Structure formats: structure tokens, C-alpha cells
Image (cartoon, rainbow, N blue to C red):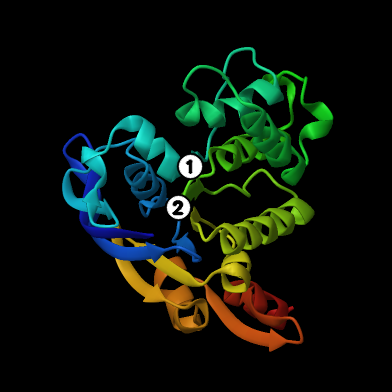
Amino acid sequence: MRMEVRGLCQGYGRDDVVSDISFTAESGELVSVLGPNGCGKSTMIKSLCNVMRPRAGTIEIDGVDMLTMPSDDLAKLIGYVPQTISSVGYTTVYDLVLIGRRPYVKWNYTPEDLRIVADSMITMNVNAYMRDDVNQLSGGQRQRAFIARALAQRPRFYVFDEPTSSFDLRNQLDTMRIMRSLIRREDACLIVALHDLNLAIRYSDKVVVLNDGRVYDIGPPEKVITSEMIQDVYGVKAEILEDSHGLFVRSYDEDEDRMEDRA
């Protein structure tokens, strides 16, 4: 399947936050959205999930305008995990993940629904506290539970807004590895907003870089994540290096280097 974003504009009040955003995302791809704080990543992500209706432009899935789709049909296509998860009221992890199956339920949950829920919890390693109140979990545990809910939806497009922000290093790597393997296996797509350039360069098939609410560049990570881009977009000096594990970004602080030289 193919999601095509054309000329997307979105904002709050009178102000546009993102303008003229255009890109495609296809089955089997992991697409990372990069850019500094305030560049419009979260606003764009919310538009892709129909949390916010676009001010202008279109978002099509296999040629069908997303805004014309019934909500249950859209829920079967897009699984969204927000950046910030507020209190959800009392609910267990199991019940939260079970919600992911609602778009498919006609009369009651089937054994297949329950199997998918169990598999999703095991995949995200939240089965050990399936009976715990979601609100009593740590930030990282809660984030994994919401990702498990998205997995239970079995959507064609996973759309995640900085899902690794609450994770330690091990869980960051595990989540990106799991999601890359899953979209390959299911021929699905992950669109994910990230801050960590090294996660993006290691796991992405395509990156979309935003700067000041517009697309700065789009393409394979090894072509787009460059020293020049990092300087232009983030205002930081960096080198792109390579070792036996592949490419990685090493940033450095010129002012600190000068102070050390003076000392």
C-alpha cells in the first residue's frame, strides 16, 4: 500500500506550523521524520492519523482521500502512538491492548482477537504486567503498552510520534529492531518521528527532514543525514563516520573544544 501526502498545511489558530509537505510512504518501508524541536514533526504526524484535519493538501492511501474513509476502516489502516500519553483512567494493560481489536469486532472478541492481543503483548514485553493499571507503569512501560495496542490493530501504516523518548538505550534498539522486522514480515509501513539521528541512520529506509515547518530534504538516510544537513537544520557540527556496524553520527561542540585548547 502507498500513502501519498501532497501539499499538506497544518497549524494552530492563525499560524501554520507545517506548509507544503509532500512525500510518499509505502509498504515495507520504515520512514523516519527528523528535525529540531518546534519544526512541526508532531503536527504533521497528527495530520497523518486524522487527529487533526489538514488545512490544505491531501493525504491519500492507495489513491483514496483519507478524509472520506469511515473511522473503522481508517483504524484498520493506521495505528497511532502519540508522543505524550496522559492518564487514560483505570484500565489494565490487557484491556488497553484489547482496544486495538475494536475496529474488527462485530459482536464479541474472537479467539483470533485474543491470540493477536497476547502476541502483541509478548512482542513488546508487557505481558508480565498485563493485569497492572496502565497509569501505575513507568513511562517506558506505558509507551510499550501503547505500542502493543497499535500492534494489535494490525494496521497497514504504523504512525509513531517519538516512541523511544521514554526508553533506555536497550529498549530504543529493541523497539526499532522489532518494528523494522514486523513491517518487513507484514508488508506494512512505519512512519516515525525521531530525535536520535543514529537510530534513523541505522534503521530507516527513507528519512524526511523538516526545518521551519517545511521539507528540507527526503531520501535514503545515507544520502540525507550529512554534516551539512545537521549544521543547517540543527545548528550543530557533526561528522558521519563508519565502522564495522555501519554509519553513525558524531557531534561535537566547537566552543567546548576551543575552551579546552585555551586551558
Q: Is residue 87 above or below residue 242?
A: above
| Residue 142 on image: x %, y % | 67, 32
- Please state, as top left, top right, bottom left or bottom right, where the N terminus lies in the image: bottom left
* Amino acid tagged 1: Gly
- Quick check: 226 left or right of 129? left
Q: CA distance from mark 1 to mark 2?
A: 23 Å
Residue occupying image coordinates x 68% and y 83%: 246
Query: Is the residue marked by circle 2 packed among few (<14), some (14-19), or many (20+) residues within 10 Å?
Result: few
**Looking at the picture, which amino acid does disc 2 mark?**
Asn
Counting from the top left corner in percent of width and height, residue 160 is at: 51, 47
- Mark 2, residue position: 37
Q: Is residue 108 visible?
A: yes
Asked where in the image residue 172 lies, by quadrant, the reply is bottom right
Q: Residue at x 59, y 13 (%)?
A: 89
Instruction: For marks 1 and 2, give the one nearer the viewer.
Output: 1
What residue appears at the point 57 percent right and 78 percent down from the top-left corner?
238
Residue picked out by circle 1: 79
Q: Nearer the viewer, residue 63 or 251?
A: 63
